[in-house]
Amino acid sequence: MFGETAELGEVLLTEDEIQSKIREMAKRITEDYRERSLVLVGVLKGAFIMMSDLAREIDLPLEFDFMAVSSYGSATRTSGVVRILKDLDFEISGRHVLLVEDIIDSGLTLKYLLKYLSTRKPASLEVCALLRKTGIQKVPLDVRYEGFEIPPVFVVGYGLDFLQRYRNLPYVAVLRDGVQP
Ligand code: PRP
């Protein structure tokens, strides 16, 4: 139904588990930002699926923007410098901003983006991330809304890809043994 899945192994998070967590996070966000308007900033490409589900569960006036970043090859893994492929379309100064990420791996992308966005002087800047791999963040991060902690394995689905595929799976699965990321 979702295309070829022969490369997939164990399902880590089912569609029901993900959707229930999204509703729970959206409820908290709705309560926390009551009486305020919010700008959701999604980090392409991975966050687009989550952002779409999350946004439709948030009962607030919302605006949307996206950033696209890419690493400078392996240097990113050590330096945390990322290349901005697409910047924000709108000014966020004085706005309440919630950065939406699908996954936090080393944490370096997030650290860079938070530093970059804070220079735009938002009224507030928080993070909503569906997944965080445990034990491998290289930097301390303050993630206000966190969905699931997962083991540090390669996962696909719900926005996450392997060679650009599997983003449309409604669940999160690991790659089958022997399939190399
Ligand atoms: C993923 C994810 C984060 C980043 C996390 O994006 O969406 O942006 O990696 O990694 P880090 O914590 O080690 O910095 P990816 O580079 O795979 O791009 P994509 O979303 O377009 O697939």
Image (cartoon, grey):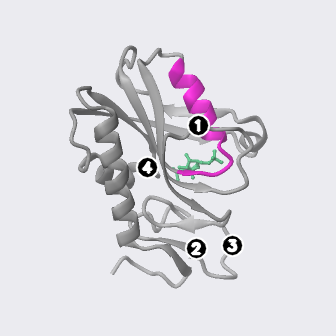
- The quadrant of the image that shows the C terminus is bottom right
Is 6 within the magenta? no
| Residue type of the residue flagged with mark 2 | Val
Q: Which residues are magenta?
A: 103-118
| Magenta stretch, overall SS | helix
Residue drawn 42% across and 71% down? 171
- Measure the C-alpha gap from mark 3 to mark 2: 11 Å
Q: Given contact means CB atoms under 8 Å apart, are the residues at marks 2 and 4 in contact? A: no
Q: Which quadrant would residue 159 be assigned to in this image?
A: bottom left
Disc 4 crowd rating (10 Å Cα; few below 14, some 14-19, many 20+) is many
Q: Is residue 176 above or below residue 103?
A: below
Mark 1 or mark 4, which is nearer the start of the sequence? 4
Mark 1 or mark 3, which is nearer the start of the sequence? 1
| Residue type of the residue flagged with mark 3 | Gln
Is 105 within the magenta? yes
Indicate the position of residue 58 as horizontal and vertical percent values: 26, 44
| Picture disc at residue 52 | none
Q: Is residue 168 above or below residue 37?
A: below
Callout 2 secondary element: strand
Camera sees residue 123: yes
Q: Which residue is mark 3?
A: 180
Q: Given contact means CB atoms under 8 Å apart, are the residues at marks 3 and 1 in contact? A: no
Q: Which residue is mark 1?
A: 142
- The quadrant of the image that shows the N terminus is bottom left
| Picture disc at residue 47 | 4
Indicate the position of residue 143 as horizontal and vertical percent values: 54, 41
- Measure the C-alpha gap from mark 2 to mark 4: 18 Å
Q: Which residue is mark 2?
A: 174
Callout 4 secondary element: loop
Callout 3 secondary element: loop
